[in-house]
Image (tube, helix red, strand yellow):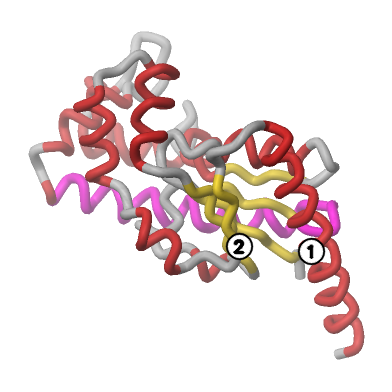
C-alpha cells in the first residue's frame, strides 16, 4: 500500500510551494483541485449529470463547465449545493485513492486544500499542515489574486480555522520565514517520510 502524506493549509499558506519542493525531490504529487476539475471535464460523467440537473446554461461557450454560473445557482439553494456535493465528492475521493495507488515514489503527497472541511484525513498515513498567521494569509492573497481584504476574509470564514487544521496535524511547517528555512523544513520532513514509508513497506512485506 502506498504511504500517503496529506498536505493542507488555508488560502495563502503556501501549500503549493511546499508541495513543489517535495516534487523536486522526486515525490509524486496527487492534487485534489486538479481531480476536481477532471471529474467535470467535457464528456465526463460528472458534467453530464450537472447538465441534466441544471441545463446547458451552466456551460461556457467552449463546452466546459462555467463554475461562476454554477456557483451562483447553488449559492442561494442549499438543496442544490447538497446535491452537487453528493455527486462530486465520492467521484473526487475515488480518484484520489486510485491516483495515490498508481504513484511510484517511495511515498506520495496528496494535496487537499479542504482536507479538514471534508474529513479526508482518513485517506492519509500522515497529515502535514502548512501554517501561517491570518495576517499573512490576507497579505499574500490580496497581493497574489488582486482581491480586496474583505474578499479574503470571507474566504477565510468559509474555511476551517487555523486551530481546526492544527488539531489534525501530525506535522506542521510554519511558513512565515524565508525560502532557506522552508527548504530546510521540507528536507527534514522528506527524510522522515522516506524512513516511515520504507518501514511501512517492510512491515507489509512481512505480513
Is 83 covered by the magenta stretch?
yes
The quadrant of the picture occupied by the C terminus is bottom right
Q: Is residue 93 above or below residue 153?
A: below
Residue found at x 59% / y 36%: 16
Circle 1 SS class:
helix
Q: Which residues are the magenta region?
A: 79-107
* Closer-to-camera residue (52/113): 113
The x, y position of residue 33, in whole percent, is: 50, 39
Q: Residue furthest top?
A: 61
* Residue position marked by numbered label 1 in the rendering: 192
Tell me the element at label 2. Answer: strand
Q: Which mark is residue 171?
A: 2
Question: 37 and 199: which one is in front?
Answer: 199
Q: Main secondary structure of the magenta part?
A: helix
- Nearest the eye: 2 or 172: 172
Instruction: Depth check: give the residue in front, 134 or 5.
Output: 134
Across and down, in percent, residue 32 comes to 53, 45
Q: Which dot marks residue 159? A: none
Task: Please determine whether, in this image, residue 125 is positioned above or below residue 19.
Answer: below
Task: Please give left or right for residue 76 compared with residue 99 in the image.
Answer: left
Q: Residue at x 36, y 62 (%)?
A: 164
Quick one: quadrant of the N terminus? bottom right
Figure quadrant of residue 23: top right
* Marks 1 and 2, the one that precedes in the sequence: 2
Cβ–Cβ below 8 Å for labels 1 and 2?
yes
Q: Residue at x 59, y 37 (%)?
A: 177
10 Å crowding of disc 2: few (<14), some (14-19), many (20+): some
Callout 1 environment at 10 Å: few (<14), some (14 to 19), or many (20+)? few
- Lateral position of residue 134 relative to residue 81, left or right: right
Amino acid at each position: 500500500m502506498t504511504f500517503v502524506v496529506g498536505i493542507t493549509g488555508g488560502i495563502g499558506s503556501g501549500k503549493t510551494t511546499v508541495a513543489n519542493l517535495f516534487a523536486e525531490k522526486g515525490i509524486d504529487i496527487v492534487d485534489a483541485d486538479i481531480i476536481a476539475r477532471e471529474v467535470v471535464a467535457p464528456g465526463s460523467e460528472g458534467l453530464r449529470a450537472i447538465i441534466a440537473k441544471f441545463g446547458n446554461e451552466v456551460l461556457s461557450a467552449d463546452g466546459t463547465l462555467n463554475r461562476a454560473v454554477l456557483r451562483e445557482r447553488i449559492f442561494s439553494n442549499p438543496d442544490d449545493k447538497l446535491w452537487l456535493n453528493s455527486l462530486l465528492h465520492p467521484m473526487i475521493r475515488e480518484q484520489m485513492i486510485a491516483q495515490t495507488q498508481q504513484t511510484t515514489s517511495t511515498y506520495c503527497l496528496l494535496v487537499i486544500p479542504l482536507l479538514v472541511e471534508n474529513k479526508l484525513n482518513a485517506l492519509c498515513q500522515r497529515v502535514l499542515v502548512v501554517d501561517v498567521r491570518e495576517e499573512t494569509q490576507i497579505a499574500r492573497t490580496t497581493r497574489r489574486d488582486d482581491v480586496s481584504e474583505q474578499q479574503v476574509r470571507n474566504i477565510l470564514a468559509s474555511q476551517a480555522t487555523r486551530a481546526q487544521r492544527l488539531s489534525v496535524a501530525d506535522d506542521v511547517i510554519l511558513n512565515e520565514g524565508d525560502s532557506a528555512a522552508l527548504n530546510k523544513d521540507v528536507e527534514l520532513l522528506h527524510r522522515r517520510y522516506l524512513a516511515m514509508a520504507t518501514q511501512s513497506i517492510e512491515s507489509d512485506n512481512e505480513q
